[in-house]
Amino acid sequence: MMQIGLTHYLTLGAILFALGLFIVSSRRNAIVMLMGAELILNAAALNFVAFNRYVSHGLSGQLVTVFIIVLAAAEAAVALAIVLAIFRNFQTVHVDNVDRLRH
């Protein structure tokens, strides 16, 4: 029977981070870019919890993960408010089409 170890969690975190980075860099839809940023934050949270479980030195991984979750919630609220304001002014959520600050 195979044990799930730190390497498995770090591999999953790297896959989530790479997928989030690919989404943020390749997509032009602001909402999809926000989802990619959330994947990156979740990858970081997974790595902190995994390191806390297998390497218990220093600051608690759960404490940092709770901070990351609070940060992600605040980021999502502010970013969605900005996306709604952009949609209200430009009738699009594609970041390439938003090229002016005033009408």
Image: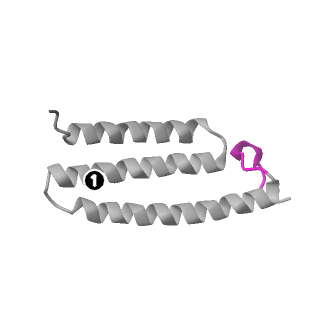
* Residue 6 location (% of width, % of height): 20, 42
Q: Which residue is drawn at 22% across and 37% down?
A: 7
Quadrant housing residue 63:
bottom left
Describe residue 38's horizontal placement relative to residue 48 as left or right.
Answer: right
- The residue carrying pointer 1 sits among few (fewer than 14), some (14 to 19) or many (20 or more) residues within 10 Å by Cα, namely many
Of the pair 96 and 64, the residue shown nearer to us:
64
Task: Answer yes or no: is residue 101 visible.
Answer: no
Residue 102 in magenta stretch = no
Task: Answer yes or no: is residue 27 visible.
Answer: yes
Q: Which residue is drawn at 77% across and 50% down?
A: 92
Q: Which quarter of the image is occupied by the N terminus?
A: top left
Describe residue 23's horizontal placement relative to residue 15 as left or right.
Answer: right
Which residue lies under the disc numbered 1? 48
Residue 100 in magenta stretch = yes
Residue positioned most to the front: 1
**Vertical comparison of 4 with 55: above or below:** above
Q: Residue at x 79, y 61 (%)?
A: 88
**Main SS class of the magenta portion in the image:** loop
Describe residue 90's horizontal placement relative to residue 3 as left or right.
Answer: right
- Give the magenta part as a residue range: 92-101
Q: Which residue is drawn at 25% across and 37% down?
A: 8
* Residue 44 location (% of width, % of height): 35, 50
